Image (cartoon, helix red, strand yellow):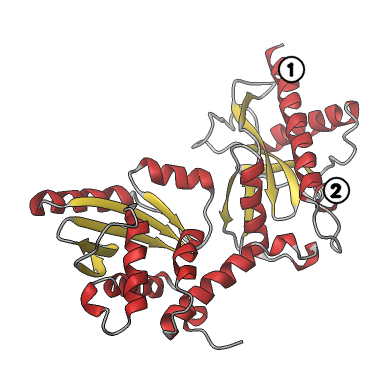
């Protein structure tokens, strides 16, 4: 494969540089160097800002790192565009609100109108992106960028070609779950699979969980059901989660999430109670694939029962059948909802 600078320089700073570089090309004074790059840069601005294709761009001043904002551009002495550029990370420290406030103050002083964009070339859960939009940012994804760049694929500039090729490679990696056998899935395959689930099921929440083993991508596919221990008023949460393989019935006893008091009931005791009740109901309902984990943990988030990967997703030498998988997941979600009702009855007796 031809060497690609963006498969080597993968940090967000390098992506920031490309975005600012393309925005700079949008200034009409650069057209005599490369007309197509200027046209592409201008169309990129129109799409980022939500302008119509007929919007005429007469002047662009753009650069990186102003007041910690990743990329900015002033357009026609009329608009300020700020871009928070993300690859694999997400928002942190309430940064978007801070950047927007800074930009609004500047626009008030200069008489400009503001556009805020959250640009994401990696993958992020839809539910997370909705929170971003609620903060006043338009979300611009990898697919949105490719839609612009693909129109100008005749551009021969190596920087442009490398960045476009990098995005295509990322897109292919996330779609690999559709045509790879399960034993060949990598993290990108799982992320693409979770994104596919978002389109078929409601309220999917997925993210990377870091641990000493390198972490994994999980996806919570059910509601969090808040229940009380049968013995006390101590609260816990029950939910269903995919852990890059097995489908796990989880309980949460984190005091930051639920009103759990270990002085009233130990995590170990609660874990055993919920496990025994799940297995009892599973036997009654003929859910024979729900079983005990190989080992029990004793943390704030514990797996109390599971369904092994081959029982709901497929065997290692198979390519998944998406329809069958969705049906299986919906079945286990229904079981959990029924079990939650059983536990409600138990805890109120």
Looking at the image, residue 328 lies above or below residue 315: above
Q: Secondary structure at mark 2?
A: helix
Q: Residue at x 24, y 64 (%)?
A: 57
Q: Quadrant of the C terminus?
A: top right
Looking at the image, residue 160 lies above or below residue 294: below
- Residue lying at the far front of the rendered structure: 54
Q: Quadrant of the N terminus?
A: bottom right
Q: Residue at x 19, y 50 (%)?
A: 113
Taking depth in this image into account, of 237 and 129 the one nearest to the observer is 129
For marks 1 and 2 on the same chain, the one whose residue lies earlier in the sequence: 2
Residue 311 in view in this figure: yes
Residue occupied by mark 2: 311
Taking depth in this image into account, of 113 and 101 the one nearest to the observer is 113
- Residue lying at the far left of the rendered structure: 109
Q: Residue at x 48, y 80 (%)?
A: 162
| Quarter of the image where one finds residue 285 | top right
Give the percent coordinates (x, y) of residue 120.
Answer: 45, 59
Q: Image check: 119 left or right of 194?
A: left
Residue 346's label in the rendered image is 1
Q: Image check: 17 left or right of 166?
A: left
- Residue lying at the far bottom of the rendered structure: 2
Q: Secondary structure at mark 1?
A: helix
């Amino acid at each position: 494969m031809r060497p690609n600078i963006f498969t080597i320089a993968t940090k967000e700073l390098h992506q920031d540089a490309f975005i600012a570089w393309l925005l700079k090309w949008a200034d009409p004074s650069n057209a005599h160097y490369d007309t197509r790059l200027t046209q592409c840069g201008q169309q990129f601005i129109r799409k980022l800002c939500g302008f119509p294709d007929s919007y005429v761009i007469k002047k662009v001043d753009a650069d990186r790192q102003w007041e910690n904002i990743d990329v900015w551009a002033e357009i026609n002495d009329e608009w300020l565009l700020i871009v928070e550029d993300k690859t694999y990370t997400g928002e942190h420290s309430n940064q978007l609100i801070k950047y927007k406030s800074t930009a609004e103050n500047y626009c008030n002083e200069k008489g400009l109108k503001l556009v805020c964009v959250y640009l994401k070339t990696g993958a992020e859960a839809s539910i997370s992106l909705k929170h971003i939009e609620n903060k006043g940012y338009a979300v611009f994804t990898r697919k949105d960028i490719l839609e612009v760049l693909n129109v100008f694929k005749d551009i021969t500039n190596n920087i442009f070609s490398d960045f476009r090729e990098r995005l295509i490679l990322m897109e292919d990696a996330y779609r690999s779950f559709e045509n790879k056998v399960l034993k060949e899935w990598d993290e990108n395959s799982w992320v693409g699979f979770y994104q596919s689930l978002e389109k078929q099921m409601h309220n999917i929440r997925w993210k990377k969980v870091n641990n000493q083993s390198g972490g994994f991508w999980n996806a919570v596919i059910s509601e969090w059901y808040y229940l009380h221990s049968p013995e006390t008023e101590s609260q816990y949460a029950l939910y269903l989660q995919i852990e890059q393989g097995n489908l796990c019935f989880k309980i949460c006893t984190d005091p930051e999430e639920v009103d759990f008091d270990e002085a009233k009931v130990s995590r170990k005791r609660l874990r055993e109670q919920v496990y025994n009740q799940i297995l009892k109901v599973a036997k009654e309902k003929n859910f024979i694939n729900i079983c005990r984990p190989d080992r029990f943990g004793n943390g704030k988030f514990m797996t109390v029962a599971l369904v092994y990967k081959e029982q709901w997703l497929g065997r290692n030498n198979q390519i998944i059948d998406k329809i069958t998988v969705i049906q299986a997941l919906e079945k286990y979600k229904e079981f959990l909802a029924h079990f939650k009702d059983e536990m409600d009855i138990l805890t109120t007796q």
